[in-house]
Amino acid sequence: MITTALAFVIENPLTAVITPKAAFSVVWLGLFGSGMAYLLFFRLLSHWGPTRTSLVAYLLPVWGIVLGVAVLQEHVDGRVLLGTVLIVGGVALVNARIGARRLFGRSAAAVD
């Protein structure tokens, strides 16, 4: 609501020309950038739980690096690769089922 009011005060949006390319971009970002992302987020949340789902945020810089190299031909040095390996390795370690054990070697007390 505030953004709409500010747009009318500052930009005068009624004079803007909406091209098919701009309309397609808005629909594409709305459906896939937000809509599909929320569906995937809630699906992960229901299957993985909140702790493991929150680890997805650690992978965002990795996607930024991949897209920077693919789209903008950015240079990647050894430090970036090492950081990427550490991020992916940390997420994999947290999600690994190897070595899963009970807290302090005891099972939870039964509630009667």
Image (cartoon, rainbow, N blue to C red):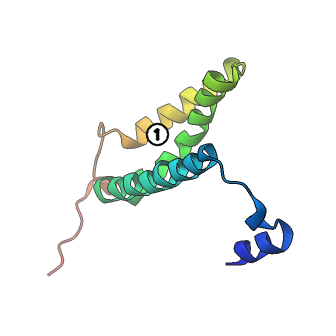
Q: Nearer the viewer, residue 38 or 2?
A: 2
Secondary structure state at the residue bearing disc 1: helix
**Image point (32%, 53%), residue name:** 48
Residue type beneath disc 1: Val
Q: In the picture, residue 61 is in which quadrant? A: top right
Q: Nearer the viewer, residue 104 or 84?
A: 84
**Image point (42%, 51%), residue name:** 36
The extreme right residue here reads 10
Q: Is residue 107 left or right of residue 74?
A: left
**Image point (38%, 51%), residue name:** 40
Q: Nearer the viewer, residue 44 or 97?
A: 44
Q: Is residue 52 left or right of residue 68?
A: left
**Image point (70%, 18%), residue name:** 77
Q: Is residue 33 left or right of residue 3?
A: left
The extreme left residue here reads 112
Q: Is residue 3 above or below residue 73?
A: below
The x and y percentages for residue 105 are: 28, 53
The extreme bottom residue here reads 112
Counting other residues with Cα less than 10 Å from the Cα at mark 1, is it few (<14), some (14-19), or many (20 or more)? some
The x and y percentages for residue 112 are: 14, 81
Q: In the picture, which quadrant includes the N terminus?
A: bottom right
The x and y percentages for residue 99 are: 30, 39
The x and y percentages for residue 20 are: 59, 46
Q: Is residue 11 above or below residue 61?
A: below
Count all numbered tags in the image, as a single digit. 1
Residue carrying label 1: 91
Q: Nearer the viewer, residue 20 or 103?
A: 20
